[in-house]
Amino acid sequence: MKKLAWIVFGALSILISFYPFTYYLADEPVALLLSKSAELLSSNVYNIFFYTHITFGGIALLIGWLQFSKKLRRKYMNLHRWIGKIYVVAVLLSGPAGFYIAFHATGGLSPILGFSIGALIWVLLTTLGYTTIRKGNVEAHKKWMMYSYAGTFGAVTLRLWLPILILIFGNFTEAYQVVAWLSWVPNLIVVYLILNKKEVLISLYRKLHIKKVIITTTVLAGITFLLSFASPQTWFYQAPSFKGNPLEKVTSLNGSSFTQDKLNEVAQYLKEESETTSMMVLENGKIVFEYGDVSEISYLASARKSILSMLYGKYVDNGMIDLQETIGSIGLDEDDGLLPIEKQATVEHLITARSGVFHPAANGGADLNNIKERGSKKPGEYFVYNNWDFNAAGYILEKKSGNSVYQELEQQLAIPLGFEDWNIENQSTSVNEKKSRYPAHHMHLSTRDLAKIGQLMLQEGSWKGKQLISKKWIQKTTTTVTPIDTVNARYGIDPSTPMQRAYSYMWWPFERFYDNPDFDGAYTASGAFGHFITIIPKRNVVIVHKTTRDLLTLAGFSNRKNTPKWRYWWILRNLMLNRKSISELAEEKSATEIIEFIKTEYNNKDSEYAISERLINEYGLKLAEELKHEDAIKFYELNLILYPSHGYFTHRIYKYYGQSLMALGRNTEALAAFEKALEFDPGNRMVSGILSKLKY
């Protein structure tokens, strides 16, 4: 056992000691440097300290473990002494450098303190080890050098712990905050126990059957770890209360706008890149694509609000709900009281997120960055996404209809649409009366039942010859109320972003989606963790996407089981890209002729060719890869003209533009292009590096 432990100890020390070569051999920032700003990476001082730290730290790690070999000490004492001297020098160079770079650690105060304190202690322990041997105190020397190498070995334990912690927390930053301490503190504790409690440890090992305890603990830890990837909240849903009607599946893709290759490509992406649990695509009311378990029921997050909007239609049409009625006249209030100005908000203000009521919601969910002081805004003049509005809207529906939100959902949608997985017992509210009287009406539905909801919206409320929701309401509820300029301002969305949404009556209409004209009139429901119901009328398509949270994500300890919006947009973009590529024109047209064609076609929403800012960029890159840089430059210049809403995403055009200019030796022009790219994306490390080379 000891021999095996020694082999593993030495092997890990040698292996990780060569890790600095990862940085030496890379042309661009890699590993931990990926989290650093371009400004920091361009700093000569930082680079000197960083490479000093990893170089000499690697040397200390490579040679230090040999010092614990009794055979080496007995046979080659002079070698032992020389290795020791080199080790001490390496630590005394690496430690202070590590202390400096610790103050630039990613993740805030915790890693700064963890790494800086660790560096100081490492240097102190090594110094004590050296001074005690100089005084002839061999025993003290052994002790302090064991502590010293425990610090050095932190380079190994950091790399063992970090991927595990990222897996647990779901992101690098939180993992790094913990590993800054976990990489070295337990190492020191282990050395302390070995030095001071060896006999006690041996006695306890025997008396407490530590071997069995370790095995049992390891097994339990393994089971717990595996369970953390499960979704136990889905195990307790009730069986369907009635048998629904399944959606019809296509038997062939003939006549479809989708190809099997495209669907296979999307399925592969979902499997390899996304945390998607299930997804369904309907075209002309039939299933053309399924991924995952579409019968699994799960929490919908904010996608519930779009469904709530649908339930309103019946009562707005029959006059039982007056959108212009104020919440004060309906009787809404809070224990701490609503302000008179807040009571002037109307029902319409609530369901368009413009109430001006900035009261805390029962389930949280406030947009804290944009919430204003209570009473500071008149109802209707300020858009902010606040769950208080939506929870109050649920209460009003219940008061006016005489039914619960879930009874309305059952009667208006579940039964008429023939839900396959519906049981009203699976629905639940969330309330905290200390915050607000009005609960959140959470919804729990399956993917295939959500697809029916999407199809009903696509069919403007009609289902099998019956008008379940009026066409007038469907059109109203998906019509923009809050324009993209306001939405962008609230959420800091750059005007050059290829995906931009407005807000309506609890739905999100698309105003721009990668310049794809098929998204004219498209809209989506959107919920946290990856819940979407997207309706694309121009293509007669409905897409439903879900990500069911695992145990750690559910408990709030991790964000690993989550499909962020940007990833869903990318899935959607690839799925819906079905027009001809402009590269096909190259067979019969010159670059200049293709550019003239694009100028005439890019506003033609019925063009058979896919034309967008990103696709023009991609074609320019293709030409650059073929070393046709003169032609590539023409397409980058075209992009800057066709898409004048310049912002963050414009940096890509200037970056590609600069790269082609450099390839042609036009460095002065390239310098200007890269400076423009950095203007739009100040944190771009790659561009900063190129600029440094061009300038110096």
Image (tube, rainbow, N blue to C red):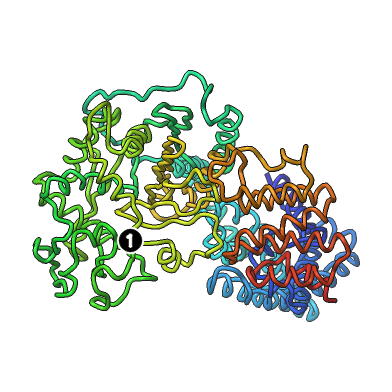
Which residue of the protein is positioned furthest toward the top in this rendering?
251
Q: Position of residue 163 (x, y in %)?
A: 60, 52
Q: Which residue is mark 1?
A: 365
Q: Position of residue 688 (x, y in %)?
A: 73, 70
Q: Position of residue 531 (x, y in %)?
A: 40, 45
Name the residue at 27% across, 37% down.
461
Name the residue at 62% across, 77% down.
103
Other residues around mark 1 within 10 Å, as few (<14) / some (14–19) / many (≥20): few
In the image, taking residue 660 as reference, residue 9 lies left or right, namely left
* Pick the front one: 347 or 591: 591
Q: Can you tell which quarter of the image residue 149 is in?
A: bottom right
Q: Is 513 rendered above or below residue 589?
A: below
Which quarter of the rendered picture does the N terminus lie within? Answer: top right
* Pick the front one: 487 or 103: 487
Q: Position of residue 400 (x, y in %)?
A: 10, 50
Q: Can you tell which quarter of the image residue 433 is in?
A: bottom left
Q: Amino acid at mark 1?
A: Gly
Q: Secondary structure at mark 1?
A: loop
In the image, taking residue 272 as reference, residue 637 lies left or right, namely right
Q: Is 406 rendered above or below residue 673?
A: above
Residue 129 shows in the view: no
